[in-house]
Image (tube, grey):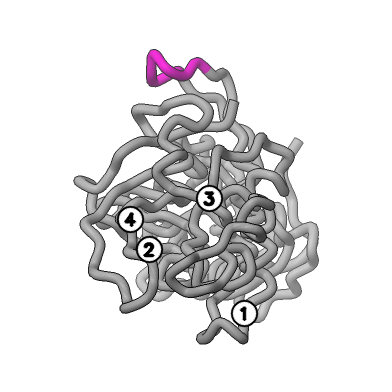
């Protein structure tokens, strides 16, 4: 059966929801060809990332010097997308992909990073300054570890689970996993996640990534940073890039040096 769209998709397109989902899925199958762009969230909505991915495909695969970011119903771009073989790196967030086992610690026939859809949708959630003004969404992440609400930070006089100045990277990971119906993690401390689930020696998008970087001194009166961090693997760009919480006090994608890696983990 030929894959078809009923109207144009992309920049200045008709952009019917189902047509957009088809194009997003086809683009994700060719993720390797448009690297370093990360796979699109298949949500049927045309935004800047979807248009940029279409342009990247037109530029990198179709060799168009001036891509228009538009997929016409029977144009060159849609014909190329539907005729191309699915790429080995195609892992749209929330979908399945068959992979060969890569480690003695993990033996999976299929992987599902459904939690990445939740993580991606939280980008831009940011701390607010001061103990009296807090982002309630970040407090929601922290509430996935209820003990934080009753644990007092003796240096600040605040309860960890009630202020968004608390280190919340592990809480964000935990929130995303629970939203996707996966088992929660061990604690709100990032270093404890290096034994969560199963180990991977080769990452795939969505892998829980634990790293360590020598921390900068903390502010007077506050806890000293541990240097540990946990987030979700996106790509090997610039060392490697992670989508996570508390990355410069916000949910975003950020690059980290390869030497900081401790472990890649996957839910059981």
Q: Magenta-highlighted stretch: main secondary structure?
A: loop
Secondary-structure class at tag 3? loop
Distance of label 1 from label 2 (alpha carbons):
23 Å
Q: Earlier in the sequence, mark 2 or mark 3?
A: 3
| Residue of label 3 | 188
Q: Which residues are magenta?
A: 101-107
Residue 222: % across, % down: 39, 72
Q: Earlier in the sequence, mark 1 or mark 3?
A: 1
Q: Quadrant of residue 121?
A: bottom right
Q: What residue is drawn where x is 39% and y is 43%?
A: 191
- The residue at 58%/72% (across/down) is 163
Distance between the alpha carbons at the discs numbered 1 and 4: 22 Å
**Residue located at (51% from left, 43% from top):** 206
| Image x and y of residue 60, in percent | 37, 58
User: Label 2 to label 3, Cα distance in Å?
Assistant: 20 Å
Secondary element at image label 4: loop
Residue identifier under label 1: 134
Marks counted in the figure total 4
Query: Relative to 241, is 156 on the left or the right?
Result: right
Label 2: which secondary element: strand
Q: Which residue position holds label 2?
A: 254
Mark 2 closeness class: few <14, some 14–19, many ≥20 residues within 10 Å:
some
Residue under pointer 4: 226
Quadrant of the image occupied by residue 74:
bottom right
Residue 41 visible to the viewer: no
> Alpha carbon of mark 1 to alpha carbon of mark 3: how far?
18 Å
């Amino acid at each position: 059966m030929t894959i078809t769209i009923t109207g144009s998709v992309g920049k200045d397109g008709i952009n019917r929801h189902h047509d957009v989902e088809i194009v997003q899925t086809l683009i994700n199958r060719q993720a390797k060809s448009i690297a370093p762009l990360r796979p699109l969230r298949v949500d049927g909505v045309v935004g800047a990332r979807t248009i940029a991915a279409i342009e990247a495909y037109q530029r990198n695969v179709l060799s168009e010097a001036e891509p228009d970011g538009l997929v016409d119903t029977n144009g060159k771009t849609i014909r190329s997308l539907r005729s191309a073989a699915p790429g080995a790196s195609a892992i749209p967030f929330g979908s399945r992909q068959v992979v060969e086992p890569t480690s003695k610690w993990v033996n999976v026939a299929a992987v599902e990073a459904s939690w990445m859809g939740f993580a991606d949708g939280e980008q831009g959630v940011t701390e607010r300054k001061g103990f009296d003004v807090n982002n309630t969404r970040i407090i929601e992440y922290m509430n996935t570890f209820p003990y934080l609400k009753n644990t007092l930070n003796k240096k600040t006089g605040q309860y960890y689970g009630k202020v968004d100045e608390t280190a919340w990277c592990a809480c964000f990971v935990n929130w995303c996993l629970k939203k996707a119906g996966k088992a929660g993690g061990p604690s709100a401390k990032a270093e404890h996640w290096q034994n969560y689930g199963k180990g991977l020696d080769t990452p795939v998008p969505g892998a829980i990534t634990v790293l360590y970087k020598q921390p900068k001194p903390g502010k007077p009166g506050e806890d000293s940073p541990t240097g540990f961090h946990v987030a979700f693997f996106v790509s090997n760009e610039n060392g490697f890039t992670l989508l996570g919480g508390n990355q410069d006090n916000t949910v975003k994608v950020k690059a980290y040096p390869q030497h900081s890696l401790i472990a890649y983990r996957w839910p059981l």
